[in-house]
Image (cartoon, grey):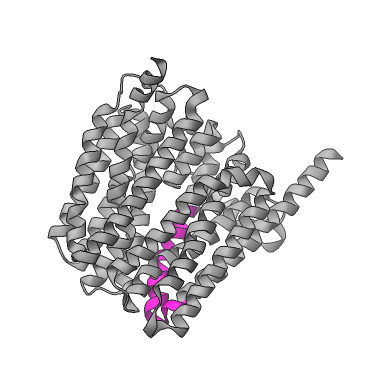
């Protein structure tokens, strides 16, 4: 009976599956849709940049609102409805400017669900069951994203991308209906409780890496900027990790924004592009499950560094493909290299990063440290996506991928420095 009651309490989680089916293809869809509307890669980069730019204040606003109004179901339902509304608007208002603005609206609305979903997992289960429950949540999210990209692959093989937008709407409706299983009678946890558990923390960061418990004070940001001097950087573990994260997100955003547009302009069909992204997402999902089993057997910093080196090599190889075979772009080669860079390497790095970050923020000033981390993620994503458009348009796509690879390799170099900082700290504590 107890097991049945627990399963019943978690039935609301299934709303995440159709939601992710609808939301999973969106970042690729918006870029290809803007190109179909005769926009340029710069226009596509404006949309992605606006999405990231809106997500930062949205995360802050929704976070503070959730603290004041303990209505988990209401915020989740609102975000699903916001996604539905955005898709409908995207279908009916077919212009580049409208697509950019609507994507900004969508980014604002979907930011409302990440925190309440994670809090509901904690509230619906005993602490001893959190690991299993968060694993189920992650499984449903990954499965939904995978099915969404698979759905997009098949639909765009038969119909124009415009119809894909409309066909994602029923999944939003299904997600909204499934929120009826959410029980708000027991509201105990606050956002701050998420950072008290490594499992809850990792789940929240995977769902959306922008998480503001508290805005970082100017003095903390100023100290980080000062620490960027070469001599200082190698002495501060937290600031070294911050810098590696900033560089990583700039490089990743350059690549992720330019890549679908580059494939499209190289002559690949929309369904081929979704097929490549789908393959990468499948590998990412698999390795998100495998990495926690492998990670404890290796030095975390070394494993994270190696994953970034492999990711950069993937970017370099894709850059070479665009130089050598632009007029005869091969799907198979892109599937292989993209799956390595954006699938396998990303899942390994991001899993390890969450562990390193959770340990680094410690027990003091967690809100400020996490606020600075989220600010740097936002800055990196915004600047990277904006750079992607201009580098691709005015120079070339291969050059944008090359820059992304160099930045990722530099992030790996910075990250490797954490080993020496940690060893020095350990030596000093023993003496």
* In the depicted structure, whether residue 334 falls above or below residue 181: below
Residue nearest the observer in this picture, 300 or 391: 300
Residue furthest to the right in view is: 431
Residue furthest to the left in view is: 92
Q: Quadrant of residue 157?
A: bottom left
Residue furthest to the top in view is: 1
Q: Quadrant of residue 325?
A: bottom left
For the N terminus, which image quadrant?
A: top left
Picture residue at 33% right of the left edge, 23% below the top: 8
Picture residue at 19% right of the left edge, 41% below the top: 173
Q: In the image, residue 276 lies at what x, y percent? A: 39, 65
Q: In the image, residue 343 lies at what x, y percent? A: 48, 58
**Is residue 81 inside the magenta stretch?**
no
- Residue 395 falls left or right of residue 411: left
Q: In the image, residue 32 lies at what x, y percent? A: 28, 67
- Residue 296 falls left or right of residue 192: right
Query: Which residues fall within the magenta stretch?
Result: 377-399
Is residue 144 visible to us here? yes
Picture residue at 50% right of the left edge, 32% below the top: 131
For the C terminus, which image quadrant?
A: top right
Residue nearest the observer in this picture, 245 or 318: 318
Say how many tags the image has.
0
Is residue 217 visible to us here? no
Picture residue at 51% right of the left edge, 45% below the top: 289
Q: Quadrant of residue 159?
A: bottom left
Q: In the image, residue 229 lies at what x, y percent? A: 66, 61
**Is residue 395 inside the magenta stretch?**
yes
What predominant SS class does the magenta segment belong to?
Answer: helix
* In the depicted structure, whether residue 186 falls above or below residue 209: above
């Amino acid at each position: 009976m107890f097991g049945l009651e627990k399963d019943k309490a978690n039935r609301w989680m299934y709303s995440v599956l159709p939601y992710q089916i609808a939301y999973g293809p969106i970042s690729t869809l918006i870029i290809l849709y803007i190109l179909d509307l005769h926009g340029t890669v710069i226009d596509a980069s404006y949309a992605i940049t606006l999405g990231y730019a809106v997500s930062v204040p949205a995360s802050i606003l929704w976070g503070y609102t959730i603290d004041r109004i303990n209505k988990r179901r209401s915020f989740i339902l609102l975000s699903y409805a916001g996604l539905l509304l955005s898709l409908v608007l995207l279908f009916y208002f077919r212009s580049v400017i409208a697509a950019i603005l609507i994507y900004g609206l969508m980014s604002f609305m979907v930011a409302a669900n990440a925190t309440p979903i994670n809090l509901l997992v904690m509230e619906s289960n005993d602490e001893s069951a959190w690991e299993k429950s968060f694993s189920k949540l992650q499984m449903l999210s990954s499965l939904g994203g995978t099915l969404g990209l698979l759905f997009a692959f098949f639909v765009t093989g038969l119909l124009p991308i415009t119809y894909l937008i409309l066909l994602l709407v029923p999944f939003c409706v299904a997600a909204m209906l499934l929120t009826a299983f959410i029980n708000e009678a027991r509201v105990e946890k606050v956002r701050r409780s998420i950072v008290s558990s490594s499992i809850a923390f990792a789940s929240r960061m995977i769902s959306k890496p922008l998480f503001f418990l508290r805005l970082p004070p100017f003095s903390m940001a100023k100290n980080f900027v000062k620490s960027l001097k070469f001599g200082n950087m190698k002495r501060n573990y937290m600031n070294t990790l911050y810098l590696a994260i900033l560089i990583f997100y700039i490089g990743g955003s350059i690549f992720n924004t330019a890549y679908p547009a580059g494939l499209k302009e190289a002559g690949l069909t929309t369904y081929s592009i979704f097929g490549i992204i789908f393959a990468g997402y499948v590998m990412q999902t698999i390795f998100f499950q495998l990495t926690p089993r492998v990670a404890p057997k290796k030095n975390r910093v070394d494993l994270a560094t190696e994953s970034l080196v492999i990711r950069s090599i993937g970017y370099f190889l894709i850059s070479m493909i665009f130089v050598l075979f632009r007029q005869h772009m091969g799907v198979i080669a892109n599937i292989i290299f993209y799956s390595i860079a954006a699938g396998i390497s990303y899942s390994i790095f991001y899993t390890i990063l969450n562990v390193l970050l959770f340990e680094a923020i410690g027990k003091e000033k967690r809100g400020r440290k996490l606020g600075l981390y989220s600010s740097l993620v936002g800055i990196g994503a915004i600047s990277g996506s904006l750079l992607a458009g201009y580098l691709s348009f005015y120079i070339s796509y291969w050059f944008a991928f090359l820059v992304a690879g160099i930045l990722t390799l530099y992030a790996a170099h910075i990250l490797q420095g954490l080993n020496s900082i940690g060893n020095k700290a350990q030596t000093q504590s023993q003496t």
